[in-house]
Amino acid sequence: MKKRIGIMVLIALTACGSLFAGGGRDGGAKTGKRVFGYTYWAASDFFETIGQSMREIIEANGDEIIIVDAQQDNQYQLNVIEDFITRGVSVVFLNPVDRDAIRPALVALQNAKIPVVNLDTSVADLSMVASYIASDNVGAGVICAEALNKALPGGGDIAILDYPANSACLDRTEGFKKTINSNFRIVAQQDAQGKPGPGLEKATDILTANPNLKAIFAANDQSGMGAFGAVVEANANVLVYGVDGAPESKEVISQGTQYAGTAAQSPKQIGTKGAEVAYNILNGRSYEKEFYVPTFLIDINNAKDYLGFWQ
């Protein structure tokens, strides 16, 4: 697991207490600080970078942020948010494990009059959050499809590794499918859960069943790296495109491998905007209900300009 970027360590959940030391409805009232809560779907330096960007702004304002990895467990995330409410946080920053199953937590937050700033992956009902801030995920899929159209104008058999429980991945897949040219034929579309292991497993099966495969589009770089591993293992002449602009994908792209490109997001910009919107909500100022950070293609031509860090 990657090293955490300066985030608070989650205290183990017990049957007799809060997830957080010093929990209580007064939140930061005793110290005069506002307390914010941020929970995201699974361990990733992408979400940690969002958290670090928010932390810098929040702590500069003399306030505090509690950051919790939900470990890709919806029930655990529901428990985390219940403890945020008990703690009396001022705003919850939410990246949901499951866009539909998070609803009970949203109802509880509404009842507690705690606004929600939804980050990266939308909840199913955006009317239940104050603001939604994300990358242009449809545009990210479009960018990958345009790159593939240019790389293989003759088309051929292609596959998609998606993640239907995640709205961002759904949007990326939508953008990709509507943009690939008519010479391509989608021979497989499977749920890789946004993770390297399932990406490797699903891509291995797809490559075995489709010896003429030309390319794989993965809805994020984690599953894309799994697919890339399968391509290397099979010694297959197959291109891989992903979404994120993650450091590990940029490294292999820069080496001229078959990981041909990634539609890069900017977690730093998402985090900065999230903190800005949260303070505008609390201070009664105007704010965007929806805000989309542009994405751009990183490929062999520019990957070396972005190595070792998140843009």
Image: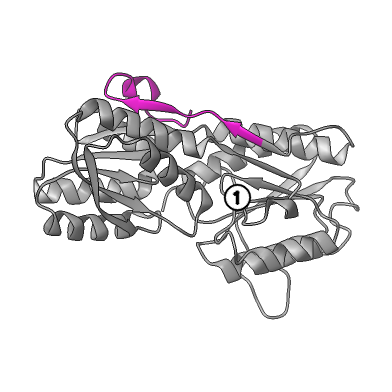
Q: Residue at x 10, y 47 (%)?
A: 212
Q: Residue at x 86, y 57 (%)?
A: 113
Amino acid under disc 1: Ser
The magenta region covers 291-311
- The residue tagged with tag 1: helix, strand or loop? loop
Query: Does 141 appear above or below 22?
Result: above
**Residue 296 at x, y = what percent?**
44, 26
**Residue 130 at x, y = what percent?**
76, 46
Q: Residue at x 57, y 32 (%)?
A: 268
The residue to which callout 1 is attached is 122
**Towards the viewer: 153 or 294:** 153
**Towards the viewer: 19 or 252:** 252
**Which residue in the rendered view is the most extreme toward the bottom?**
15
**Residue 64 at x, y = what percent?**
75, 45
Residue 110 seen in this snapshot: yes
Query: Does 295 appear above or below 110?
Result: above
Tell whether 275 sits left or right of 248. Answer: right
**Towards the viewer: 10 or 247:** 247
Residue 88 falls in image quadrant = bottom right
42 inside magenta stretch: no
Tell me if mark 1 has few (under 14), some (14-19) or many (20+) residues whose alpha carbon lies within 10 angstroms of its own.
many
**Residue 131 at x, y = what percent?**
72, 43
